[in-house]
Image (tube, rainbow, N blue to C red):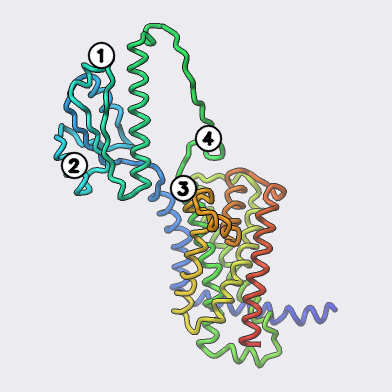
Amino acid sequence: MLTSMRLWLRPLAALTRKELLQLWRDRILLVFMVYAFTCDIYLAGSGVTLQVSHAATVITDADRGAAARELRARLVEPSFNVQPGHVNERDAMRALDRGEAMLALDLQPRMTADLAAGREVTVGLNVDTSNSVQGFLGASYVTRIVSEFGIQTGLAQLGGGNGMTLPMVQNRIRAWYNADQNDAWFMAISQLLNIITVFAILLPAAAAVREKERGTVEQLLVSPLTPLQIVLPKLLAMGGVILLTVMLSLNLVLWPIFGVPCRGSLGLFFAVTTLYIFSTAGLGLFVATIARNLAQVGMLTILILAPMLFLSGAWTPPEALPGWLAHGMVISPLHHYLDIAFGILLKGQGAGELLRPVMWLVGIGAGMFALGLYRFRRQFG
């Protein structure tokens, strides 16, 4: 028994070493991997934000009284970049049309006098919503600021500023798992998981297709090796390299630069990442059975990645998707891997709490790997 096992493992080890040597000699691919797991994640974490930042704002101030100046002073950096000086309504609309401003606040004449007299005041806001998310957020920020200004002005007129107690409802928000609501944590982790997905599909597929292009796969097929012994070394070698670059990314980018915590078990994170890499590699094998060259591998990988990323929940939460698409998210392995990775790194969840997404990942991965191996056996077996 031990002898047969040793005979089965010996060519496996030799072929795994061969795959590592081939990857080592492909310096361009290695440089691309190092760039993707370091510079690309740094750019995503530091350059992409989901909040309004330095929104170009123009204010049409037809009042120029104390109340208008007070409201104008509340639109400050880093959320707003208010154009200095006074502009008329026509210039404000022209700035919106030219894309020079995203927000145009219109303060009506006699605003200060009407507030002092206890009369209702209207404040206009024109928003460039060509970028609907940024436009919605910018409008929400201004609405909150104007509302607070109105409440405080009303309280002052009712005597709240003279020691008089008025009934109020206080909204106390407690942000969990990311107390500072740092976008860099979410973006850096999401990009790391996306890059893992790209290479988990691309590397095994490229290694298998390279054998087809060079004609060496026929040499392997006439040897005593089984299809599993031909496929498994590619997955072991590429999976090991991906895990190494993940550790590199954590130690060079996520931890020292962005301060991303690891509140759960790092061993559990790497165990699940290993499971995810081998699960997704089944798609790479499937691609390798269809593609005839490396260019086709690249195009098919993009074709598979697009729906996986869209259905992962990284860009759009499941609740915001149409019902049939939200149900489709359960077949995306990246969706479950995102839940697991964020649960371990930010929430400190353990294996028991993550059992459900792990089981989904095992089930989807087993199906994809079986499909890839079946296609490989039919084509080359």
Q: Secondary structure at mark 4?
A: loop
Question: What's the residue type where badge 3 is placed?
Answer: Ile
Which is in the foreground here, disc 4 or disc 2? Answer: 2
Residue 20: quadrant of the picture = bottom right
Q: Secondary structure at mark 3?
A: loop
Q: Where is residue 3? Give x, y as percent.
A: 82, 81
Q: Secondary structure at mark 2?
A: helix
According to the picture, the residue beneath numbered tag 2 turns out to be 93
Question: What's the residue type where badge 4 is placed?
Answer: Ala
Q: CA distance from mark 3 to mark 2?
A: 41 Å
Q: Is residue 254 above or below residue 309?
A: above
Q: Which mark is residue 91?
A: none
Q: Earlier in the sequence, mark 4 or mark 2?
A: 2
Question: What's the residue type where badge 1 is placed?
Answer: Ala
Q: Earlier in the sequence, mark 3 or mark 1?
A: 1
Question: What's the residue type where badge 2 is placed?
Answer: Met
Which is in the foreground here, disc 3 or disc 2? Answer: 2
Please indicate whether residue 183 sits to the left or right of residue 13 in the image.
Answer: left
Residue 147: quadrant of the picture = top left
Instruction: Write the residue at 64% across / 78% down.
Output: 231
Q: Secondary structure at mark 1?
A: helix
Q: Is residue 242 above or below residue 156?
A: below
According to the picture, the residue beneath numbered tag 4 turns out to be 175
Circle 3 packing at 10 Å, graded few (<14), some (14-19), many (20+), is some
According to the picture, the residue beneath numbered tag 3 turns out to be 257
Q: Which mark is residue 116?
A: 1
Q: Are marks 1 and 2 in contact (CB under 8 Å)?
A: no
Circle 4 packing at 10 Å, graded few (<14), some (14-19), many (20+), is few
